Image: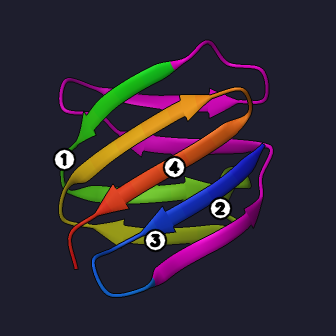
Amino acid sequence: MNLVMLNPKHVVYEGEAQSVCLTGDSAEFELLDHHAPIVSLLRAGEVIVDGGRESIPIKRGMVMFNRDECVILVEE
């Protein structure tokens, strides 16, 4: 999947990923290639790409996944 993480000032992360673990507002969840479309709020925690290849702390934000395109918007 193509993964893009943005904050109001710049691109935090951009690249290909096989999996993304996120801290949803209700529970943690993982997005994989070909996942069903989803939109979710995110709470404070970490976005973990490919089982730990990248670990990016966040305060809160939102994620949209559709057609193997994952866009994550986060606070600074």
Q: Name the residue under label 2.
A: 52
| Kind of residue indicated by mark 4 | Val
SS under mark 1: loop
Instruction: Find residue 43 and name its label.
Output: 1
Tell me where the magenta segment starts and ends, as one range.
11-37
| Kind of residue indicated by mark 1 | Arg
| Kind of residue indicated by mark 3 | Ile
SS under mark 4: strand
Instruction: Find residue 71 and name its label.
Output: 4
Q: How far apart are marks 1 and 4 (CA)?
A: 16 Å
SS under mark 3: strand
Residue mark closest to the camera, 1 vs 4: 4
Q: Mark 3 points at which residue?
A: 56
Of residue 8 and residue 75, the one placed in the foreground of this image is: 8
Residue mark closest to the camera, 3 vs 2: 3
| Kind of residue indicated by mark 2 | Gly
Q: Where is residue 51 in the image (x, y as percent from the top left)?
A: 69, 51
